[in-house]
């Protein structure tokens, strides 16, 4: 921390400490209060985060941050108008979660001298806290602890009925899958770029835990997230010896999958393998068989009923009885045209910038692209923008690695 104090001003150090709390405690401090309500450290960090955003001076608005700010602005406008038109209810206050989810990105942009030291410290903290949270979720799964009466299940189809999907410390398999895939991608990127002690051991640990927790959560979106992130990293992983261990672990995982698919196994394991079998090794892959895509046409029809203002945050399920399962469509429908356009432009801008840096040979640019592209892929199959537990961390590390990539490239070409 002494090194950070010498690099950051008073206000920036305050912001950094808030970011450290996001990375260090939010993965572990989250509680399921009831089937329909949970609360966590992210909610309590909103007040200091807003204080820092409003009262600490920072960098000027950029081409990347402008659409991001506009997205939050139009989201609040949509909520305000929807609340004025419809009968206001306590459920409408969930719009506060939008601010909680997306505030960490803006906090990172307020730190002028955000560099490798700051990033690697945050990543190391997240590696520890996130790993502990995932291991706790794995323990809950094997101990048969269900945190919700409606915790997601998988129907085996062999007469054995249904089996519970791992849901992490909140009992939500989709959220657990999203959190796991963020942790798996960010941690492996950070191990490669920050080169900590015991990098080989840490790489194998992250790879194994991320894959196993994804398997027991049976999250196809999470598996796609991990695969894309890790594949994009190949150009920089090849530069270190960990690539050998990475391929050994990958080969072992595939061999295990084939062995399990050939022998006798429980209906739960067989069903999970068929759901996650992206390469159709079993010959019965269900990876692309999902009703999510069938809902998209219906969702577009819903959007036409409220194109400008939207239906209101998290109202798709309440009003129409369906899940969006697509963050981009969900934002257009719930928060309106302007918020949707701003959200898309933000991801286009930051992806283009990091792709340019990656093309120029920046290792940090490649790492940033791995985190960003994998997160975008997840957003296409899940309404990630409503995941208050995991999404703040996705936005934090998206901003953090993008800042390091940009500053490192600018410094090397000065």
Image (cartoon, grey):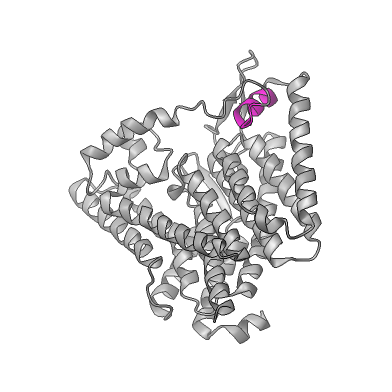
Q: Looking at the image, which residue sits at the far top?
A: 159
Residue 190 lies, in percent from the top left, at 66, 61
Q: Specify whether residue 169 is in view.
A: no
**Main secondary structure type of the part rendered in magenta:** helix
Q: Foreground: 100 or 249?
A: 249
> Looking at the picture, how far across and down is residue 243, in whole percent?
76, 52
- Of residue 298 and residue 246, the one placed in the foreground of this image is 246
Q: Residue at left 37%, top 53%?
A: 344
Residue at 76 percent of width and 20 percent of height: 262
| Residue 148, picture quadrant | top right
Image spot of residue 98 (x, y percent): 40, 55
Instruction: Please give left or right for residue 214 compared with residue 32 in the image.
Output: right
Q: Residue at x 46, y 75 (%)?
A: 110
Above or below, 384 relative to 189: above
The answer to which image quadrant residue 343 occupies is: bottom left
The reply to whether the magenta stretch includes residue 272 is: yes
Q: Nearer the viewer, residue 23 or 378?
A: 378
- What residue is drawn where x is 50% and y is 76%? 111
- Residue 214 pos. (x, y %): 64, 40
Tell me if 161 is positioned left or right of 386 in this view: right
Q: Is residue 291 left or right of residue 122?
A: left
Q: Considering only vertical position in the picture, is 361 above or below 84?
A: below
Can you name the residue that lies furthest to the left here?
85
Report if residue 127 lies within the magenta region. Answer: no
* Residue range (magenta): 268-280
Can residue 334 be seen in the rendering of this structure? yes
The C terminus sits in image quarter: bottom right
Against 215, residue 175 (above or below) is: below
| Number of numbered tags placed on the structure image | 0
Q: Quadrant of the N terminus?
A: bottom right
């Amino acid at each position: 921390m002494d090194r950070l104090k010498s690099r950051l001003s008073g206000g920036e150090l305050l912001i950094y400490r808030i970011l450290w709390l996001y990375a260090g405690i939010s993965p572990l401090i989250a509680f399921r209060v009831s089937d329909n309500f949970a609360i966590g450290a992210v909610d309590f960090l909103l007040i200091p985060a807003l204080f820092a955003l409003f009262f600490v001076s920072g960098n000027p608005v950029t081409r990347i941050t402008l659409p991001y700010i506009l997205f939050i602005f139009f989201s609040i406008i949509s909520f305000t108008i929807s609340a004025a038109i419809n009968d206001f209810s306590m459920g409408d206050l969930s719009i506060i979660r939008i601010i909680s989810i997306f505030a960490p990105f803006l906090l990172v942009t307020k730190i002028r001298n955000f560099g490798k030291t700051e990033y690697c410290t945050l990543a190391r903290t997240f590696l520890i806290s996130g790993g502990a949270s995932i291991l706790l979720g794995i323990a809950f799964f094997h101990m048969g602890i269900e945190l919700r009466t409606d915790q997601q299940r998988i129907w085996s189809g062999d007469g054995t009925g249904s089996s519970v999907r791992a849901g992490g410390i909140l009992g939500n398999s989709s959220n657990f899958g999203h959190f796991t895939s963020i942790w798996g991608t960010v941690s492996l990127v950070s191990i490669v770029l920050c080169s900590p002690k015991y990098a080989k051991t840490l790489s194998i640990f992250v790879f194994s835990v991320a894959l196993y927790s994804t398997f027991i959560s049976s999250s196809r979106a999470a598996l796609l997230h991990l695969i894309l992130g890790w594949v994009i990293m190949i150009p920089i992983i090849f530069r270190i010896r960990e690539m050998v261990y990475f391929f050994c672990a990958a080969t072992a995982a595939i061999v295990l999958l084939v062995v399990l698919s050939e022998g006798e196994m429980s209906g739960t394991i067989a069903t999970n393998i068929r759901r996650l079998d992206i390469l159709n090794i079993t010959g019965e892959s269900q990876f692309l068989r999902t009703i999510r895509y069938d809902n998209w046409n219906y969702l577009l029809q819903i959007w036409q009923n409220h194109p400008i203002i939207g239906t209101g945050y998290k109202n798709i399920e309440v009003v129409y009885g369906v899940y969006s399962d697509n963050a981009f469509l969900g934002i257009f429908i719930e928060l309106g045209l302007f918020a949707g356009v701003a959200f898309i432009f933000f991801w286009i801008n930051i992806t283009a910038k990091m792709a340019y840096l990656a093309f120029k040979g920046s290792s940090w640019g490649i790492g940033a692209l791995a985190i960003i592209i994998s997160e975008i892929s997840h957003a296409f199959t899940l309404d990630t923008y409503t995941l208050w537990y995991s999404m703040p961390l996705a936005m934090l590390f998206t901003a953090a690695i993008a800042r390091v990539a940009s500053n490192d490239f600018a410094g090397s070409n000065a």
